[in-house]
């Protein structure tokens, strides 16, 4: 699985960059020759584009993505509203929870978004109970992720 970020505002992704990112999302282990064939460019072009995207922080890594059915994991997104000056303590507590596999500060109605990955629905319930007990968490809303439609 491709992990991507954003280029600085002075950098612009062109059509080839977007096509390359889409191809890598589909198969992050695809050989350069196969990517070049699929995109209608040379292997050198693909290699240089990947290197440039990595240098600019658009591509920040490649990982293995397990099929969620095979792994039997339940995934959820938990939106959290945090009171006052308890943000840093809440973040520290959430970072220490194995079920929290991603944690993002955001703007708007919610202060944090926690990604949860656990084996069962009962574990989601248990994890949410623990999250709601964290000092400063005064409101939450959670959605189960049923399936990925990106890959």
Image (cartoon, grey):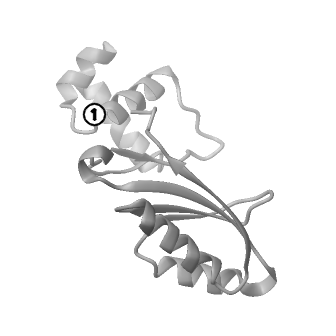
Q: Does residue 63 sit above or below 39 in this rendering?
A: below
Q: Which residue is mark 1?
A: 27
Taking the spot 51% from the left edge, 56% from the top edge, the residue there is: 76
User: Is 28 situated left or right of 12 in this image?
Assistant: left
For the residue pair 145 and 34, the one nearer the viewer reads as: 145
Q: Is residue 10 in sight in this rendering?
A: yes
For the residue pair 122 and 90, the one nearer the viewer reads as: 122
Q: Please state the horizontal and vertical placement of residue 92, each as a whole percent of the image.
A: 56, 83
Q: Residue furthest front?
A: 122
Q: Is residue 67 in sight in this rendering?
A: no
Q: Quadrant of residue 111?
A: bottom right
For the residue pair 125 and 68, the one nearer the viewer reads as: 125
Q: Does residue 142 sit above or below 26 in this rendering?
A: below
User: Is 22 situated left or right of 82 in this image?
Assistant: left
Q: Residue furthest top?
A: 40
Per the image, label 1 sits on a secondary structure element best described as loop
For the residue pair 144 and 99, the one nearer the viewer reads as: 144
Q: Quadrant of residue 12?
A: top right
Taking the spot 59% from the left edge, 78% from the top edge, the residue there is: 91
Q: Quadrant of residue 114?
A: bottom right
Q: Please state the horizontal and vertical placement of residue 80, each as a whole percent of the image.
A: 68, 67
Q: Please state the horizontal and vertical placement of residue 37, each as a whole percent of the image.
A: 24, 15
Q: Does residue 99 sit above or below 142 in this rendering?
A: below
User: Is 95 situated left or right of 1 in this image?
Assistant: right
Taking the spot 56% from the left edge, 71% from the top edge, the residue there is: 128
Q: In what quadrant of the picture does the C terminus appear?
A: top left
Q: In what quadrant of the picture does the N terminus appear?
A: top left
The crowd level at tag 1 (other Cα within 10 Å; few <14, some 14-19, many 20+) is some
Q: Please state the horizontal and vertical placement of residue 28, each as a whole percent of the image.
A: 28, 38
User: Is 6 situated left or right of 88 in this image?
Assistant: left
Q: How many marks?
A: 1
Q: Does residue 133 sit above or below 143 in this rendering?
A: below
């Amino acid at each position: 699985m491709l992990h991507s970020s954003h280029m600085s505002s002075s950098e612009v992704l062109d059509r080839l960059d977007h096509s390359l990112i889409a191809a890598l999302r589909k198969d992050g282990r695809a050989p350069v020759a196969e990517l070049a064939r699929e995109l209608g460019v040379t292997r050198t072009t693909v290699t240089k584009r990947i290197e440039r995207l990595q240098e600019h922080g658009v591509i920040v890594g490649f990982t293995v993505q397990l099929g969620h059915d095979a792994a039997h994991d339940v995934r959820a997104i938990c939106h959290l509203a945090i009171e006052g000056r308890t943000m840093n303590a809440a973040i520290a507590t959430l970072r220490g929870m194995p079920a929290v596999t991603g944690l993002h500060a955001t703007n708007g109605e919610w202060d944090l978004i926690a990604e949860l990955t656990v084996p069962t629905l009962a574990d989601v319930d248990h994890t949410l109970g623990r999250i709601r007990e964290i000092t400063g968490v005064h409101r939450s809303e959670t959605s189960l992720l049923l399936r990925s439609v990106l890959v």
